[in-house]
Amino acid sequence: MFLGSFIHVAAVPIIYNVAHTALCNMNFDYKRYIGVTLKQGFAMMLVWAPFSINMGIILKYIPVNWSDIALPAFIFALLGICISCLCEYFTHMRKEKYSFAVSISVNKNKVAETTKKLVEYISCVLAFVVLMDRFTEHAAIDILILCSLTIPMIWAVMNKKHKSYIDTVKEHFNVKVPQLKNLYIIITTAGFLMLALRSVGFDEFLNNIFLTAMGNFGVISTMLIIIFIMMLSSWIGLHPFIAIAIICQNLNFANQIVSTEIYTYSLLVACSLSNLVSPTTISTAVISSLVDRNVFEVGVKWHILFIAAILLLFIGFLMILM
């Protein structure tokens, strides 16, 4: 699901179709399995991916470089996926009997070649982002936009797929961009809401709350409070990107008693878990439609054990960093 780092929600139906083809002939509830894998994989992608919207928002307001947080965040995401596999195994997989109803032929050479190209592409993108982040003065969001525009085009030309790339770009602007109108509404709404909150002194109120909480309950407890607040607000309907934007724009990180890295990791995990349980995110709606289950089941019921395990992992992660 790390492919979602680069094509976001578009990765969901792509990977669903690939997994559906591979698993539909097996005698078990493959739709639930695919739904859990997609949702939890997409959530872990949000913890580290340079092109995710939540990462762009956080890097815009918090004075931290993506290259400084990328490796620990990536390791956390990998551990999260391992936890996802273990949770799925102990709750469902070992109780099921898996067998193929029909035999499936696989071209192993083609799979290996495609995998190699995918790894090469992702490595090139990440290397370019790290180099630009380290050795230039450009803002992180500008670097990500530059990578999004140039690297796919260069890669398409190198692989002699430039005509297909041009057709895909035209289709994207003609078909996909108009479909994102809900996202534009969310961003505009977030802007108006943040202006309204700051006009009534919400930023000062929020900073005082966090400083008081850290003094009374400690750093780890305060970070967990942030996560729970974001999860609750997302579950009752506030989009996670709006919640993360409100916190980032109103919190004065220079006056806080913990490092900006700690706040960054906490907000990334908060946004990841909020996206997991939120019924308003595009990923939840898409996956719910694909697996034919209601949004509560897709967003909450399937992930309770996983969320509890991720929170325990996050506590250990903060203890190591501190």
Image (cartoon, helix red, strand yellow):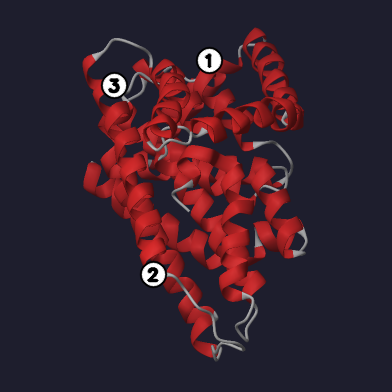
- The residue mark sitting in front, 2 or 3, is 2
> In the picture shown, does residue 319 fall above or below 250?
below
User: Which residue is labeled 3 in the image?
Assistant: 133
Spatial distance from mark 2 to mark 1, Cα to Cα?
A: 59 Å
Q: Position of residue 81 (x, y in %)?
A: 41, 60
Tag 2 and tag 3, C-beta contact below 8 Å: no
Q: Which callout, 2 or 1, points at the residue further toward the start of the chain?
A: 2
Horizontally, residue 208 falls left or right of residue 21, namely left
Task: Report the amino acid beneath label 3.
Answer: Asp
Query: Residue at point 27% right, 28% down?
Result: 130
User: Which residue is labeled 1 in the image?
Assistant: 204
Task: Report the amino acid beneath label 2.
Answer: Lys
User: In which quadrant of the rendered view does residue 104 lie?
Assistant: bottom right
Instruction: Report the front residue among 214 and 232.
Output: 232
> In the picture shown, does residue 147 fall above or below 164?
above
Mark 2: few/some/many CA within 10 Å (<14, 14-19, 20+): few
Element type at marker 1? helix
Spatial distance from mark 3 to mark 1, Cα to Cα?
A: 31 Å
Q: Position of residue 205 (x, y in %)?
A: 56, 19
Element type at marker 3? helix
Spatial distance from mark 2 to mark 3, Cα to Cα?
A: 37 Å
User: Which residue is labeled 2 in the image?
Assistant: 108
Query: Residue at point 52% right, 50% down?
Result: 42
